[in-house]
Amino acid sequence: MVQPAPASPLFWRFNPEIYQRMGMKCSDCGHITYPRRKICPECGSFNVKEHQLSKTGKVHTFCINWTPPPNLEPPIVNVIVDLDGGGRYQGLITEVANPEDVTIGTKVEMVLRKVMTDRGLNIYGYKFRLVEEG
Ligand SMILES: [Zn+2]
């Protein structure tokens, strides 16, 4: 069976949701949502505009996966992050020696990293790394 080729890096590079962290903010209630929507999920308003999400936040919840999908090295730590200023973003943790160092409320920041290699193409995306407090 022939598999489709991975998406063009050019397509992803100019996708504002992926690399510019573009979400939506409701002009009526102030709710911030990601991915972008045409209707505010909080109040139902159509009065929404683009809003660039923060790169920093705190872990809302996480999961340590010891048997990830192909092309990913175990263990991977998948997190959902409450971003500073509003919005939630899902991603993988990077640059952590011990996955158990990740807890709810841990401060993190987004960094652009290689996510995987698919049929010879490197696929990049945002991951989160722990922020030293002090
Ligand atoms: Zn709203």
Image (spheres, rainbow, N blue to C red):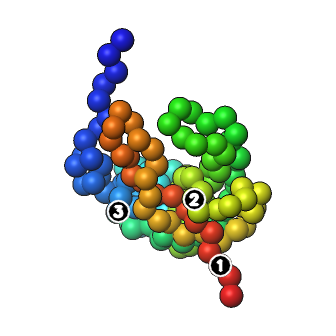
Q: Which mark is first along the chain, 2 or 1?
A: 2
Q: Where is residue 104 in the image (x, y as percent from the top left)?
A: 74, 61
Query: Secondary structure beneath disc 3?
Result: loop
> Going 68% across and 61% down the picture, which residue do you hit?
97
Dot 2 beta carbon under 8 Å from ligand 1:
no
> Going 51% across and 50% down the picture, which residue do you hit?
41
Q: In which quarter of the image is the N terminus?
A: top left
Q: How far apart are marks 2 and 3 (CA)?
A: 19 Å
Of badges 1 and 3, the one in the foreground is: 1
Q: Which mark is first along the chain, 3 or 1?
A: 3
Q: Which mark is residue 20?
A: 3
Q: Quadrant of the C terminus?
A: bottom right
Which residue bears the numbered disc 1? 132
Above or below, 50 relative to 56: above
Q: Type of residue at label 1?
A: Glu
Q: Type of residue at label 3?
A: Gln
Q: Type of residue at label 2?
A: Thr
Label pair 2/3, CB-CB below 8 angstroms: no
Of the pair 119 and 64, the residue shown nearer to us: 119
Query: Secondary structure beneath disc 2?
Result: loop
Which residue bears the numbered disc 2? 94
